[in-house]
Amino acid sequence: MPSISMGQAQSSPQWSVITTTQIKPEFRQEYEAIQKEITAAYKKAGAPSRPVVQTIIGDLDEYVSIAPLGKFGEMDGPSILAKALGDAGEQRLLHRIGAYLLGAHRVTSIALNDISIRTPMADPGAFAHVTFLRLAPGKGADFAAYMKDDYIPAMRKADVANLWLSQTVFGGNPNERVMVRPMHKLAEIDLGPLTTRALGLEGARQLMAKQNGIVESVHYTIVRVRPDLSLMPAPPEKPKAEQ
């Protein structure tokens, strides 16, 4: 199932609850209205963030919401919706939204900050290029080494400010890694592959060859961040010298 992690915090470990929904397209307006209600409930309950993204290249009826999870013990008590709306209010809202769904899937993922690039910024981008990588069994350590020693240095050379890696844990395939590259404009794609821009054609070919035997399959999508449906993370604090 698609997942995406957009948190900017540096705490470790950093868990997220990722909910992917496929909607009945004729009810898009109603579905989005309820997403606004859900986000308002999260804000009322004191949640730090709840970004919502919409797939624009891929499954066009797909939305993904991302909620940070400090620890799994938080799931032992009432849900965030129940805290904000009460049990009856939560059930009414879930009953309404259920009429607009074709399917829903929830996973937990953990941020892989040691093989990510994270530059705190108030606006990392309105779009994101999302890469889903299915690793060969038993190749997690090899993938981490490849990312740390080869891929991430190439991305830094290409002046990539943010590249977020996460691993699906519960609810999905633990061999899946998700790589998110925020973009301010889709025109960034027109500039060509980042590996080629950083290393040239031959260097990019050699870099990709190192994935052989580690990565079994790759799938790409493009998503658009929906601030109107979201509770966005608080912008990072400015250094004291800038305040």
Image (spheres, grey):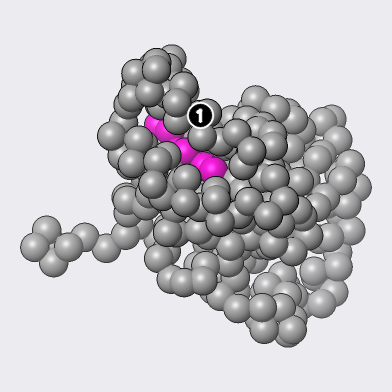
- Dividing the picture into quadrants, the one containing residue 41 is bottom right
The answer to whether residue 144 is seen in the rendering is yes
At a point 74% along the width and 84% down the height, the residue shown is 76
- Amino acid type assigned to the residue bearing label 1 in the image: Met
Drawn side of residue 173 relative to residue 4, left or right? right
How packed mark 1 is, by other alpha carbons closer than 10 Å (few <14, some 14-19, many 20 or more), is few
Q: Say what secondary structure mark 1 lies in.
A: helix
Residue placed most toward the observer, 151 or 96? 151
In the image, is 93 to the left or to the right of 212?
right
| Residue 92 x/y as whole percent | 86, 64
- The residue lying at 65 percent from left, 33 percent from top is 218
Q: Is residue 120 left or right of residue 218?
A: left
Which residue is found at the position 35% from the left and 57% from the top? 235
Q: Is residue 225 above or below residue 14?
A: above
Name the spot of residue 88 as percent of width and height, x first. 85, 74
Observer-nearest of 64 and 115: 115
- Which residue corresponds to mark 1? 208
Q: Is residue 187 magenta?
A: no
What type of secondary structure mainly makes up the magenta span? strand
x 80%, y 52%: residue? 105
Is there any visible trace of residue 228 in the rendered image? no
In the image, residue 204 above or below residue 39: above
On the image, the x and y values in percent for residue 156 come to 31, 39
- Range drawn in magenta: 179-185
Which of 237 and 132 lies nearest the eye of the viewer?
132
Image quadrant in which the C terminus is located: bottom left
Q: Is residue 180 magenta?
A: yes
